[in-house]
């Protein structure tokens, strides 16, 4: 924490601010704590997040969790990207506790990321822990690095997908997922 605090102090001085002025006096510590929180996914493992919440089930129909909000930091500029994630899987004798899907999304989102990698990491993790016949993940988000700097396109958004197993091989499975997340 001290290293990050010193780094933020240096940043404030580098942009020409006085880190001793009233409004900034505690900013290096607050910023360090915020960064630690925003990147706490590095301190988590898939096993800890799932915490044994895999249950036997006869269900073999598609399970979808839609509109999971996510907040991440772009690894290129350390600026936020904010959006929603849709996750679907086809069980094969086991289902995962509902909240665990959102926790998996958060674990990977709370790391420095690019959206393309985040999408694939979530899909791979869900497939690994469920042993399902397939997984589909779609992320839609807005990137502050495009909105606040650079091209400054306020209404731009990015959509990525990762389709594994039957979601990749079977067009009907993929289309069912795509149709259900549109609603």
Image (cartoon, grey):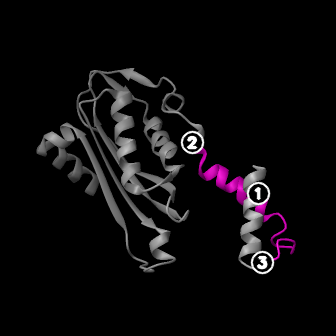
Q: Residue at x 39, y 36 (%)?
A: 125
Q: Secondary structure at mark 3?
A: loop
Instruction: Mark 2 or mark 3: name the one nearer the start of the chain.
Output: 3
Discs 3, 1 touching: Cβ within 8 Å: no
Q: Residue at x 24, y 50 (%)?
A: 180
Q: Residue at x 26, y 57 (%)?
A: 182
Most foreground residue, 71 or 5: 5
Q: Which residue matches tag 3? A: 17
Check the picture and name the quadrant holding the C terminus.
bottom left
The part of the image, by quadrant, that contains residue 78 is bottom right
Instruction: Mark 1 or mark 2: name the one nearer the start of the chain.
Output: 1
Examine the rendered structure and indicate whether residue 91 appears above or below residue 149. above
Residue 28 visible in this rendered orientation of the protein = yes
The range drawn in magenta is 17-40
Q: Which residue matches tag 2? A: 42
Query: Residue 70: x percent and y percent?
Result: 48, 54
Most foreground residue, 14 or 90: 14
The part of the image, by quadrant, that contains residue 129 is top left
Tell me the distance, in whole angstroms, between the alpha carbons under discs 2 and 3. 31 Å
Tell me the distance, in whole angstroms, between the alpha carbons under discs 3 and 1. 15 Å
Q: Residues within 10 Å of mark 1 (few under 14, many from 20)?
A: some
Q: Secondary structure at mark 2?
A: helix
Discs 2, 3 touching: Cβ within 8 Å: no
Q: Residues within 10 Å of mark 3 (few under 14, many from 20)?
A: few
Residue 183 visible in this rendered orientation of the protein = no
The part of the image, by quadrant, that contains residue 151 is bottom left
Q: Residues within 10 Å of mark 2 (few under 14, many from 20)?
A: some
Instruction: Mark 3 or mark 1: name the one nearer the start of the chain.
Output: 1
Tell me the distance, in whole angstroms, between the alpha carbons under discs 1 and 2. 19 Å
Q: Which residue matches tag 1? A: 5
């Amino acid at each position: 924490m001290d290293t990050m605090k010193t780094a933020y102090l240096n940043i404030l001085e580098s942009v020409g601010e006085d880190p001793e002025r009233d409004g900034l006096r505690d900013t290096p510590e607050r910023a360090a704590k915020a960064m630690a929180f925003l990147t706490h996914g590095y301190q988590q493992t898939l096993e800890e997040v799932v915490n044994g919440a895999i249950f036997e089930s006869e269900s073999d129909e598609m399970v979808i969790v839609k509109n999971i909000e996510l907040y991440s930091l772009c690894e290129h500029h350390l600026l936020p990207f904010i959006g929603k994630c849709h996750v679907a899987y086809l069980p094969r004798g086991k289902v995962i506790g509902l909240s665990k899907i959102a926790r998996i999304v958060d674990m990977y989102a709370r790391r420095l990321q690019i959206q393309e990698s985040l999408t694939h990491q979530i899909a791979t993790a869900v497939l690994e822990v469920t042993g399902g016949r397939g997984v589909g993940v779609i992320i839609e988000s807005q990137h502050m690095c495009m909105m606040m700097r650079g091209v400054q396109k306020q209404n731009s958004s990015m959509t990525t997908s990762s389709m594994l197993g039957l979601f990749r091989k079977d067009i009907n499975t993929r289309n069912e997922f795509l149709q259900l997340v549109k609603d």
